[in-house]
Image: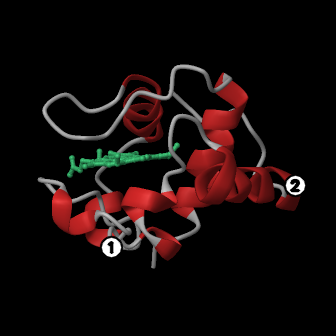
Amino acid sequence: MKNMVEPTEENILAGDHLFNSTAKPIPCIICHGIEGDGIGLIFQGIKPYARNFTCYQSMKKISDGQLFWIIKNGSHGTQMPGFTKLEDKQIWQLILYIRGLTY
Ligand code: HEC
């Protein structure tokens, strides 16, 4: 599975907006933290901790297709919820944003 959404500024900003404020039921930032480092407001309350998207070593092993599936369906056995109400395009925008957090 490939990201069909172009990495334009507009799409990355749309992903930023979803991640930090508008995604339902809860914006990603609450668990994944500012800049996606996994240190969200409630990070100590969840096990395993939310994924650290800034870690290149772990992110490079995860395909776009896998990211897409987890955002849509959630991650079984963790507190990662499925974001079933997002449109596919919005999920790809989130993935563009998340990839941009990695260093
Ligand atoms: C209630 C807390 C919570 C919220 C809200 C949340 N996540 Fe997660 N997320 C987690 C946890 C916990 C994991 C599991 C970490 C793991 O498997 O290592 C996870 C895993 C993931 C993964 C899988 C990474 C991997 O290792 O394969 C992705 C991608 C992801 N989250 C993206 C998002 C996005 C995008 C949003 C917002 C639309 C979001 N998450 C919202 C807690 C959350």
Badge 1 residue CB within 8 Å of ligand 1: no
Q: For the C terminus, which image quadrant?
A: bottom left
Q: Are marks 1 and 2 in contact (CB under 8 Å)?
A: no
Rendered view: 54 above or below 79: below
38 and 10: which one is in front?
38
Residue 42, percent from left and from top: 30, 63
Q: Which residue lies most toward the bottom here?
A: 103
Q: Earlier in the sequence, mark 1 or mark 2?
A: 2
Q: Residue at x 54, y 50 (%)?
A: 27
Q: Which residue lies most toward the right here?
A: 10
Q: Amino acid at mark 2?
A: Glu
Q: Residue at x 28, y 57 (%)?
A: 50
Residue 98, percent from left and from top: 53, 58
Q: In the drawing, does residue 45 fall left or right of residue 2?
A: left
Q: Label for residue 56?
A: none
Q: Residues within 10 Å of mark 2 (few under 14, many from 20)?
A: few
Q: Amino acid at mark 1?
A: Ile
Residue 29, percent from left and from top: 50, 61
Label 2 sits on a secondary structure element that is helix
Q: Residue at x 45, y 34 (%)?
A: 71
Rendered view: 40 above or below 84: below
Q: Label for residue 39?
A: 1
99 and 72: which one is in front?
72
Badge 2 residue CB within 8 Å of ligand 1: no
The residue labelled by disc 2 is 10
